[in-house]
Amino acid sequence: MTYTLTGRVISKKNSKQIFRAGGRTIISTSKAYKIWHEATLWQLKASKRPPTPLDGPLTLTIYFYLKGKIDADLDNLTASICDVLTDAEIIADDKHITELHLFKRSGAPEFSTSLEISQA
């Protein structure tokens, strides 16, 4: 299965908000991450999805195309993609990914991400 996502991937790990409420510290994902996650869920749900989430050993290949001179950490970008694939019910759980191929290209005219998912 292949998917192409538009827009900049927001890192869940580096997008935390810290609040103090009633003497307690509350850590939450940022508004930017929540907006990206919701928009990406809609893109994936509008695409052809498997009748049931994929499980068993999976191979995931991700191509990140970054606009201009912007750079990002592959590990953080990948975690965000794996989370949204699970939430969109394309994969049952990211623990089933046994093979992972990552590519990052800067200098693209626009942000986009291409995904290829197959049984390993």
Image (tube, helix red, strand yellow):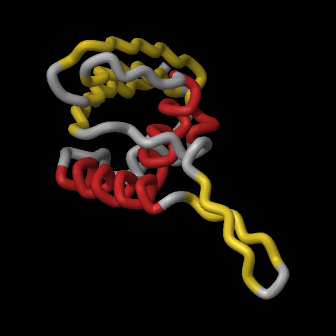
- Report x, y in % for residue 78: 50, 30
Residue plotted at (61% across, 60% down): 17
Q: Is residue 100 above or below residue 13?
A: above
Camera-side residue of 28 and 61: 28
- Report x, y in % for residue 96: 59, 34
Q: Quick check: 117 left or right of 19?
A: left
Camera-side residue of 79 and 7: 7
- Report x, y in % for residue 47: 19, 47
Q: Is residue 64 above or below residue 4?
A: above
Quarter placement of the N terminus:
top left
Residue plotted at (42% across, 20% down): 71
Task: Examine the image and state in which quarter residue 18 appears.
Answer: bottom right
Count the marks: 0
Q: Point out the residue furthest to the bottom here.
A: 22
Q: Quick check: 8 left or right of 13?
A: left
Residue plotted at (26% across, 24% down): 67
Q: Point out the residue furthest to the right here.
A: 23
Residue plotted at (56% across, 29% down): 97
